[in-house]
Amino acid sequence: MYVLEVEHLRSFFNTENGVVRPVRDVSFKVEQGEVLGIVGESGSGKSVTMFSVMGLLAKNGYVGQGRVTFDGETLLDLHPETDEVDLQTLRNVKANYEKHLQDIRGKDIGMIFQDPMTYLNPLLTVGFQMSEGLKRYFHLSNAECRARNIEMLELVGITNAEKRLSQYPFELSGGMRQRIMIAMALNSKPKLLIADEPTTALDVTIQAQILELMQSLQKKIGMSIILITHDLGVVASMCTHIIIMYGGQIMEEGSDMDIFYRARHPYTEGLLNSVATCDNELGGKRKLEPIPGSPPDLRKPPQGCAFVDRCKYAMKICKAHEPPVVTLSDTHSCKCWRCHPEVMAMEQEG
Amino acid sequence: MVKYVLKRILMGVLTIFILASVAFLMIRIVPGGPFDADVAEMSEEAYRNLEMKYGLDKPLYVQYAVFMTNLLHGDLGESLQYTGTPVADLIGRGIGATARLATCALIFSVAVGLALGISASLRPDSGLDRFCTALSTIGVSLPNYVVAIALMYVFAQKLQWVPVTGLDSYKSYFLPVIALSLNPIAHLTKLSKTSMIDALNQDYVVLARAKGMRTGRVVCLHALKNALLPVITYIGPLISSLMIGSFVVENMFTIPGIGKMLATSITMRDYTTLTGMVIFYGTTVIVIGIIVDLIYVLIDPRVKYE
């Protein structure tokens, strides 16, 4: 049973400098109780994908195509015949999608964000911000909200919970604010938690604590998690299934073992090589290998593979044609010409 | 907090005394005196008697000492223009009309300005947004006396919907209130629009939506509360300027407020009334300033006065 199914999602931003396409045909599924990691560098489209699904895109952002099914219910089913952008239709679609989502967001899907410093409202108390969702969805009284909030704050490891409720965000530390944001998202016991770089803005010791906390809560509540991050270390410790995104597309997808031990895509390889480790398997010191170059301009997405300009294995075909998604095993798939059976055969022939 | 307020009040009192001294000196430096108009009909002796009665024959420092002693006792003196009437009574008589006018203009301009600004912020580049931009430009550049004349001509003289002058019925409020409000509406529309757009783009708005809050609540609570801070900063000085700045409008519509009184006290060289008025206005500005600072504390928990 899948909690969330996303098929052929495309989004774009209508900007002064033209149409930007940060999400280009992305499909994935999240199983119940699964922790899915979406990994990629800045601008790879990982956050925009989830913001599109959540209907939280900025005013100039639209979902142009795709099907989103949550908990068996299809929320969005949009398959335009042309690639042309018709703003009026898309605005209507967006408004319609928003209506569907307004009864799901915050209840069945919780979301936590990157920067706990800016995502909490500075003028409202912690208690007020935590109670809003409870009042809206569960019609709890003030006293009931209070009891639930205290219970939740204690669950995420905040001491002095009662006092914290009447405090304002500026009176709390970054780690504490992130815990509060998590408590807020979990208050309604959601089926799915989307965590958009939840540890990026925190220092390393707090990072570890927050990840541990998320893991233990996931087991307790039994929800699914989508963890968006650029940090492979975070993914390794938490996720059972991993998606590698680049240039608005999924480059490689597989189980944690597939990605860390059997990676096939040059971009995944590059990401793994640029992770700092204390020692490698050979026991020797290894130099960090950055991936040269920068991500493609998504105003004019490349005709062939998005990664071609930075790929050390690039072939002629990579520039001319977009690679197909090649299934390597039940769990593992890769969008690269080098994985294509015919190319592999040719390589073997030399 | 209490300490801060006490300090502000103390500073305020000091400011008032400096202000009173400056006003006292300035009006006496200006050529001409309070009884110049009547000099032709008066004998030399009568003029001397008048000067003696009000102490104007004494050296300046003596006059100043007497003025300050009286001020410390809360006595603003007698008007030189309406002889025998205490300045405090004059202000008391006029303050009602001015305050009513200023209150109406304040409510009207805040309501209209915020409504326009917020609606425009929600629909950028719409017809309403363009209207607001045009209104802000026109409203800022048109002086209120020009607006007043135009309004009087169209609505009072041509259409005869409302009386031209006075402040006798509720109908008489329309024109002066609109004339007074146009400029603040322009400022408030622009200010609330920009600060609202800024607030709507903040991360906490995304979180509020992610929590499942409905659009109305996100806009009216999460964004608006933050967007109001700069608006309140503007409203403080606006109240003072509506009280003081109304003198042009009061004059044009012959409304018996203190604005009109201030204008005549200058032309008539009514020393006591003028200094009294300056002290009154100064006190108003200072008191409103303190109140606005306190409102700030109520809205923004991050503001703390030491």
Image (cartoon, rainbow, N blue to C red):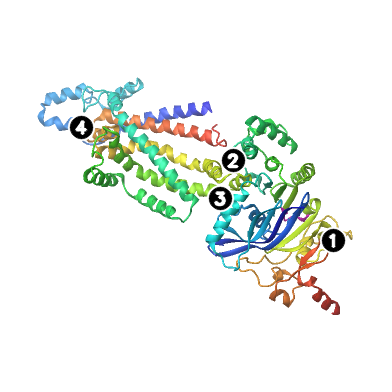
User: As drawn, which residue projects farthest toward the bottom?
Assistant: A349
Q: SS at mark 2?
A: loop
Residue carrying label 1: A261
Residue carrying label 2: A122
In which chain is the residue bearing label 4?
A: B
Quadrant of the image occupied by residue A327: bottom right
Mark 2 neighbour density, 10 Å: few (under 14) some (14–19) many (20 or more): many
On screen, B274 above or below A332?
A: above
In which chain is the residue bearing label 1?
A: A
For image coordinates 46% across by 42% down, the residue present is B231
Compute the Cα span from label 1 to label 3: 42 Å
Kind of residue indicated by mark 2: Pro
Question: In the rendered structure, which segment of residues is drawn in magenta?
Answer: A228-232
Nearer to us of marks 3 and 2 is: 3
Compute the Cα span from label 4 to label 2: 58 Å
Q: SS at mark 3?
A: loop
Compute the Cα span from label 1 to label 4: 99 Å
Image position of A34 (left or right of B155) = right
